[in-house]
Image (tube, rainbow, N blue to C red):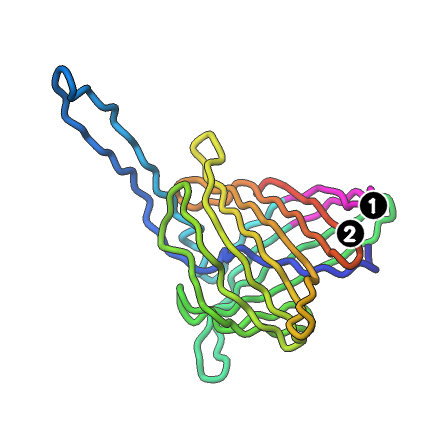
Amino acid sequence: MTQKSFRFRQVQLIIFICVTMTIFTNCGSSSNSDQPSPHIAVTTYQLYNPLLLEPGFKETATLEGRDSNGGIYTGTYETETLPAVVLEGHTVIPIVTTLNLTQTSTNDTSTSLETTYLVDINTPFRKTSGPVTYEPGAISPLPASGVFGDQGVITSWSGNDGTRISGTWGIEDAGGGFANIVESSTTEDVATNTILQTQEQILTIDESGNSKTISFIITIPAQNFSYTLSGDFN
């Protein structure tokens, strides 16, 4: 496990304050051609926890999974909001995501830590992941709220190691009144156009933006190696 290198990207848990509402479309009725139409309820989902930008916010998911070589893992995935700090004259809010994994057969452990700094709800300032520092390129925050079928691109990031992260997001029906925020991202070497890593992350939320479950599929093409992890938030 300690010999494998992977970078975990966050679905921009980041960056959106949303409002939850239910929209009802009422249609009149009459006989013949104007048949009664059922009420259609369209649920709008808040796309992240409303307390995410408050210092002291923390949520943790307990994970389990395996890799493509048959290794089995347990671990945790945690998001924590720290007090605001000043970087280069900007007051920014650090949001730290930490992935801790243990390979159960060998007891090897690995920790991946990433910090995203936000100027405000829609403006990412910087991201650090291990030794790599990322600057935002094309900023594309998620909308304030969403319904099933909404989709778009995520903010792109350029690293000082010559890599770039880009991808897409979408909202899908998870059943039971929940929604899946699905983010697919690619990390590539800009100079060679080589894909270094792909990741699909699925975050299941309720209408108010509370995180319920999360899953990852992380693939490292050059090593023909992948991880599949999933778990519930405490």
Q: Which amino acid does the dot numbered 2 rest on? A: Phe
Q: Nearer the viewer, residue 56 or 43?
A: 43
Pick whichever of labels 1 and 2 is earlier in the sequence.
Answer: 1
Q: Secondary structure at mark 1?
A: loop
Note whether 103 is above or below 187 in the view shown.
Answer: above
Marker disc for residue 77: none
Which part of the image, by quadrant, shows the C terminus?
top right
Q: Secondary structure at mark 2?
A: strand
Could you classify mark 2 by the number of other residues whose Cα lies within 10 Å: few (under 14), some (14-19), or many (20 or more)? some
Note whether 169 is above or below 62 in the view shown.
Answer: below
Q: Is residue 143 magenta?
A: no
Magenta residue span: 62-76
Q: Locate residue 167 relative to residue 39 in the image: left or right.
A: right
Marker disc for residue 69: 1
Where residue 176 appears, as percent x and y from the top left, is 46, 29
Marker disc for residue 225: 2
Where residue 189 appears, as percent x and y from the top left, is 67, 69
Q: Nearer the viewer, residue 96 or 10?
A: 10
Q: Identify which residue is drawn at 32% across, 36% down.
A: 42
Q: Is residue 234 visible?
A: no
Q: Are marks 1 and 2 in contact (CB under 8 Å)?
A: yes
Extreme residue in the right direction = 106
Q: Which amino acid does the dot numbered 1 rest on? A: Asn
Q: Is residue 152 visible?
A: yes
Q: Identify which residue is drawn at 44% across, 76% down.
A: 91
